[in-house]
Amino acid sequence: MAQIQIKLVKSVIDRPERQKRTVKALGLGKIGSTKAVENTPQVAGMVAAVQHLLEVTEL
């Protein structure tokens, strides 16, 4: 399956708790942190829920 690289580009401060937990579950912590993950339907749904905070690149 294809991999995607996700990067946190906006802060989770002042965001709903659900979005904070989603970002943490994706393995991101601070602004600028990146992670390469498999593009599964579960991950795609999580990315879609917080897409306004992320930058997504296909690998």
Image (tube, helix red, strand yellow):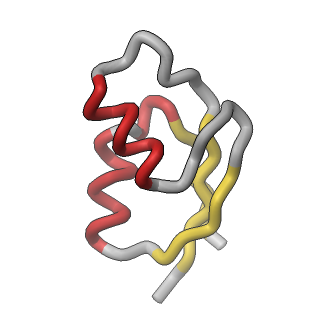
Q: Residue furthest top?
A: 14
Residue plotted at (42% across, 39% down):
51
Residue plotted at (37% across, 18% down):
15
The front one of 56 and 19 is 19
Label count reads 0
The vertical placement of 59 against 23, above or below, is: below
Query: Which x, y percent locates residue 18?
Result: 26, 33
Q: Residue furthest bottom?
A: 1
**Based on the displayed image, in which of its 4 quarters is residue 35 positioned?**
bottom right
Query: Which x, y percent locates residue 6?
Result: 59, 53
Query: Which x, y percent locates residue 34?
Result: 68, 52
**Based on the displayed image, in which of its 4 quarters is residue 11 positioned?**
top right
The vertical placement of 34 against 40, above or below, is: above
Rendered-image quadrant of the C terminus? bottom right
The front one of 11 and 39 is 11
Residue 1 in the figure: left or right of residue 58? left
Residue plotted at (28% across, 71% down):
41
Residue plotted at (60% across, 40% down):
29
The front one of 48 and 13 is 13
The vertical placement of 37 against 35, above or below, is: below
Residue 14 in the figure: left or right of residue 36? left
Query: Which x, y percent locates residue 32?
Result: 73, 37
